[in-house]
Amino acid sequence: MAATATLYHAQLTGWERIKEFFNAKFINILALSLFLLLAVFLLFPIFAVLVKSFQGPEGFTLAHYENFFTHAYFFQSLYNTLLLGLINTIICVGVGFCFAYMTTRGPMALRKPLKIVAMIPLIAPPYLFALSLIILFGRVGLITKTFGVNWEIYGFDGVVIAQTLAFIPLAFLMLENNIKSLNPNLEESAYDMGATEGTIIRTITLPLLAPGLLKAALLVFVMTIAEFGNAAVLGGRVPFLAPDTYTMIVGEADFSMGSVLSVMLIMPCIMIFIAHNYLLKGKKFTTIEGKPIASEPRKMSPFVKVPFITVTFLFGFTIFICFAVVILAAFVNILGVRNEFVMRHIMDFRSNMAIWNSIRVSFIAALVGGIIGTLLSYVIVRGKFVGRNLIEMISLSGFALPGTVIGVGYLIAFASPPMKLTGGIMILALNCVFRFLAVGVEAGITKLHQINIEIEEASWDMGATFFTTFRRIVLPIMFPAFIAGFIYTFMTAMVSLSAIVFLVSPGYELAAVTIFDAAAYGKIGLASATTLKMIMVVILCMIVLNLLTKFTNLDIERKGGAA
């Protein structure tokens, strides 16, 4: 047998031997290539920030960290940021649980409307709520003037409210998915044995949701402390790390001190990840049989129904009002001051060019990110090499780290040769690709776990090369995961601000930065109109993609079911 194999290889030409080598080592070569991309565009920028924080005029120094810990302003900035994250996490997870419980266990008539309301903020930039709060509670705001409210929206309270409204959907989506996976028969059995609904929630539902609650809390905390727009627009004189980092980099050109602030943003995230893994280590949170079982919805107890409906309706109405006033302000000269109808905000040339640039960047990022995410998920699940877990961890880290840090890292790492990327559109797209890669990777991993590897093995046994099997069998089956990564990356790249605000250059202004600049200079009508156009673009693109997948017989839901 060995002699036959030796004779076979001896008869191969040079080109055939190369093809044979690539066929045998295809997945390892692909994994190495993807790791190099992650190292260059994700690890290197983070490393550059860390190195810069220790650099002084004469080399290594701790003076910047000494400056941070000895100045009360920076300590107050860190304290405000952590307090903001803690408050927002508690409120968002609590309200998100109320929405998730009502859309899965509540009255059938309320489930879909509440789900729509809870998810609406996902199609808008988080700083929409800063705009709407200024319109309502600013110095000449609608509510301020109408009711004579003597409350200052600019400050810590305003930032907390805006961040809460912006990030409720994140907590809701994670918790709803977890509640759906619970076996409702456990709750039904407890209910039949006389337990009240409050007792069931406290002793069964919440304990089983512990992993989901912790993950939702982690995600909300990271997103809220890193969110730049709301804190910069509404913060006033209250210091926060993300806006202070922007001021250090853009305003004072102090990259070393800006890097120190970035490191301070990273540290809480790392500590929370470690605490999260420690709390869940060695513990299992599963329901009997591991799968939900369909059951008739039971009537909710008034003691649970009334407070849950009150919370969801209150926050749902607030979200609706915020969207309504931004839409109205887009077509009014100065809402609440000069209420005549105008179209100049909508027709603004600079705003329209920024929207077009955002579409270009988002499309490139979504296409490249969807492809890389699909390939990464394949090598992580199907690869047999050492380091698969490391590649997965690195690919997910961009989503977990504050966008402000990655933006600063790209500015430092790619500002000079041999990898000078600043001053163009590509650095904006690459930043979005590797920041939002996690969704495509996770979607691909989930999809591959549903596909039996015997399908691929049968193809190999019939003589197909590794590459042919991958191209003609694996990729079509994984198309839904590609679409998931594409849609999410496109949406988030359109509305992202915290990272790209450091990277924009003249001629490549993006809509998110245009909105921020307009709001900072009091041009609320222009900011509102740009926000409205951005929302419409996101909605239109989602509709087009959905129709495209159906007309090409590659519908996401149908494919998922077929697999």
Image (tube, helix red, strand yellow):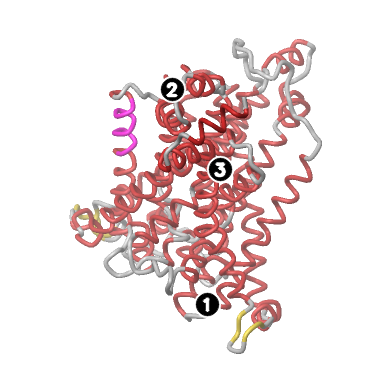
Q: Which secondary structure is most common in the magenta stretch?
A: helix
- Residue 545 falls inside the magenta stretch: yes
The region drawn magenta spans 541-549
Q: Check disc 1 and report the residue beneath it.
A: 255
Label 2: which secondary element = helix
Residues under labels 3 and 1: Cα distance?
A: 38 Å
Q: Quadrant of residue 196?
A: top right
Q: Which mark is residue 557?
A: 2
Q: Is 426 one of the magenta-colored residues?
A: no
> Horizontal placement of 357 versus 437: left or right?
left
Q: Identify the mark nearer the N-term, 3 or 1.
A: 3
Which residue type carries mark 1?
A: Phe
The circle drawn on residue 28 is 3
Residue placed farthest to the bottom in the image? 58
Name the foreground residue: 316 vs 367. 367
Tell me residue 528's x, y (percent): 32, 54
Q: Is residue 136 left or right of residue 47?
A: left
